[in-house]
Image: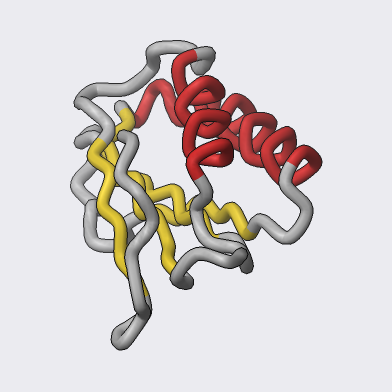
Amino acid sequence: MASARSAWFVYYRVDTQAQDAWLPAVDAMQAALRRRWPGLVARLMCRTDDAQAGAPVTWMEVYEHPDGMLPALQADLLAEVNRLPLHLTGPRHTERFSERGAAAPDSPAA
């Protein structure tokens, strides 16, 4: 049975010198998740108003699945995140949003 349609938004700051090393790691993680979870939409976005020279840049990962963020998918995502190299300048923050009027949000795990 499908869960309520929802999305996860994971944001963090990346040091400008670490971006070139961090990008392939995040891309590979998201590609692996998409292979294991057909239908998963995994995107990486970059904040456009962080334009100060040398300042850390805010990145946001966005995850959506037609069946919702099922507990097994959540656990898989968290396991992948724990394997990433530590080129972050701050902690990862996860927020969950559900479509308005959805019956029940996905269970929290991160």
Q: Nearer the viewer, residue 63 or 89?
A: 63
Q: Residue at x 73, y 60 (%)?
A: 39
Which of the 4 image quarters holds residue 23?
top right
Q: Residue at x 42, y 62 (%)?
A: 7
User: Relative to 36, is 55 on the left or the right?
Assistant: left
Placement of 81 over or under 37, stated as above or below: above
| Image location of residue 4, percent across then percent down | 45, 70
Q: Nearer the viewer, residue 37 or 49?
A: 37
User: Relative to 58, is 62 on the left or the right?
Assistant: right
Q: Residue furthest bottom?
A: 101
Q: Residue at x 23, y 39 (%)?
A: 93
| Image location of residue 52, percent across then percent down | 19, 47
| Image location of residue 12, percent across then percent down | 28, 38
Q: Nearer the viewer, residue 85 or 75?
A: 75
| Image location of residue 106, percent across then percent down | 38, 56
Task: Quarter of the image for the N terminus: give it.
Answer: bottom right
